Structure formats: C-alpha cells, structure tokens
Amino acid sequence: MTDDSRIKELRRIREENNRMAYALSDYINEYPCAITASLMKEADPDGDLPEERLYKALMSGICGINENDIEANGYIAEGVCKLSPEKYAGDPYYSEIKFPDVSGGGWKFTHSYYRPFEAFVRDDVLLKDDFREIQRIGYFSERFVFPSVLQNGREWMAIKPSEVETMRPVIEKVRGKVAAFGLGAGYFAYMAALKDETESVTVIERDPEAIALFNRYILPQFEHREKIKTVRYDAFEYMEKVMPDMAYDYAFVDLWHDNSDGPELFLRAKPLEKLSPDTEFFYWAQEYLFSAIRWNRFDQIIKKAETYEEVLYDLGDDSLSDACMQSTGRV
C-alpha cells in the first residue's frame, strides 16, 4: 500500500469516526431514553434475543444505521454495553459517603439519576491501532442514582460511571504528594487518599463556595481527611507561581466540563508542566481531548509530513502533546 493510499484510508477513518461520534452524540443529547423496557418487549416479545444485543440493534436503528452497514454497527457493537449497578455500589465513595442535598453561591450538591435503559457516556474514547475511535456508551436496566454537583443549574461534576472509569487509571498510578486541580465532589481526592502510598492530596479550587460546601459536608466523612488540603487559587496561576516550589510527585488536572471547553484549557495547562519537571501530569478524559486536537490538526500534519510514518508519529498519543504545543506557538 502506498503512502497516498494509507493517508486516504486515514481520511476515511476520520470521516467514519466523525459520523459515529455525531450520531451517538445526537442520540445521547436528544433522545437518550428512546429505548425503554416496553420497546424492548415489543421488539422481542418472546425474549429470544440477549438483552444487550437487542439494545444495540435498537440503538443502531434509531441512529439511522442500516443493518448492512457493517462498519458503523461495529462501532456500536464494540462501544455499547450494559453496566451492573453492583459494580458501582461497591465503590468506596458510593458506599461510605452520604452525599447531602445542599446549595450555596450558585453551587448545589444533589442527586441525579439514569432511567432504565437510558444511554450515557460511560468512559473515555477508546483509540484503536488504526485510529478508529470507539465512543463507549453504557446503560443500566434499572434506575441508577448518583451524586452530582451543579453550578448555576448546570451539571459540573457527578460521581457517575464516566467519572469513575476515567479517573480509575490515574488513581491507580498516583502516590506520594499529589496535586488535584478542580474539586468537584472530591471523588479523586478521596480515592487517592485511601491509598497507603499517598502522602498528601492538595486540591486547588478557585471558587470559595464550592470549597465551603465540600469542607462542611463532604470532607468530614473522608476516612483519610488528614491527608487532604483544599487551597483557594486559580489553577493556572498556581501552576505558574506556587507549584514549582511544592515538589509534587503527581498532578491531576480536571478543569473542564467536556470537549467544548476542554481542548483550550488543556492547551493552556500543558506548557506549564515544564515549570514542574519532576511532577508527572495526568488530564481528565485525555483521549477525548486528544481526539479533538488530533483531527483538528490532521490536515496540517498531512501537509508537513513527508512519509506515512511521520503522520503516524504526529497523530500518536506520545507525541501529540508536544505537537499541539508547537502548533500553538506556546513552546
């Protein structure tokens, strides 16, 4: 296969990624509850089909995907799955923290829920070796309640499967002195502090009302609250002026709501890593961020690369951050 044909295939994959991302995004944003128990029963009255297989078939149909569209259905087959409530009920935060319903200063700590068969994002995007990006969607077959934090009526953070799954790999890695940018409901801080290998967790949060609600209602319930310190500071100012002298081992940055604001804030934070060279940085929902940045730069990468291998290098995860910095003139 020639370089030109390989690049043509990458363009095709980008288009397919976009097609499926748009279709599933529309589904989740516009009619996440289109599949119901009654629809499942109507589609398979005798219960002959496995529930998850039927659910995927119905989702494909509602998304307008023809049953003969093997590639599109492959995205759904690999990305959509039924989740078990028991898995999350056993999570330490779910089982130990009694989340209050309180509010103050535009912030509200409350509870939200997924309806039976409601579709939602369950994890970070899955990047395949050929650069296909699988959107990972989940559902429960029963009502699932979870703690959530609202800012001015908009969900800012929630202890739901997507948060648990996207933070899990980072929580497994951190140890020693840890900095966490963004407070939310304190899930990351709580889980990191549970580890014997974690010495301290410093949470940097700029909103005083969010800190006040957390310190009053949530922090006192933490098993290792002595390890956790909340600091009122702008994240970027802290990274620039304070963090270089703090000798953190790890930092977790979670400052954005989703892909609408994530790439810009990520590109603002990433160059500041060089001020703390001994700290290893992680970013929430990193693959979603990389996806947005990767394909925004795709045509630029194609133009400057001389070989297909150079294209792969610039699109790959390890080099993507540096490439992004160079493209913005920030390094």
Image: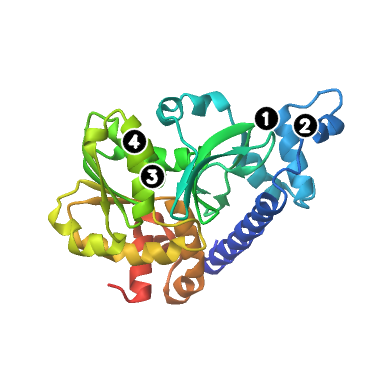
For disc 2, the marked residue is: 37
Mark 3 vs mark 1, CA separation in Å: 33 Å
Tell me the amino acid under the disc marked 1.
Ser
Local crowd size for mark 2, using a 10 Å CA cut-off: few (<14), some (14–19), many (≥20): few
Residue visible at 48% across and 47% down in the picture? 108
Which of these two is toward me, 3 or 210? 210
Dot 4 crowding, Cα within 10 Å, few <14, some 14–19, many 20+: many
- Give the Cα separation between the discs numbered 2 and 4: 36 Å
Residue 202 located left or right of residue 168 = left
Quadrant hosting residue 174: top left
Q: Which mark is residue 213?
A: 3
Single out the mark in the foreground, 3 or 1.
3
Residue 15 is situated, as x and y percent measured from the top left of the image, at 63, 62
The amino acid type found where label 3 is placed reads Leu
Cα separation, mark 3 vs mark 2, equals: 38 Å
Q: Label 4 belongs to which residue?
A: 190
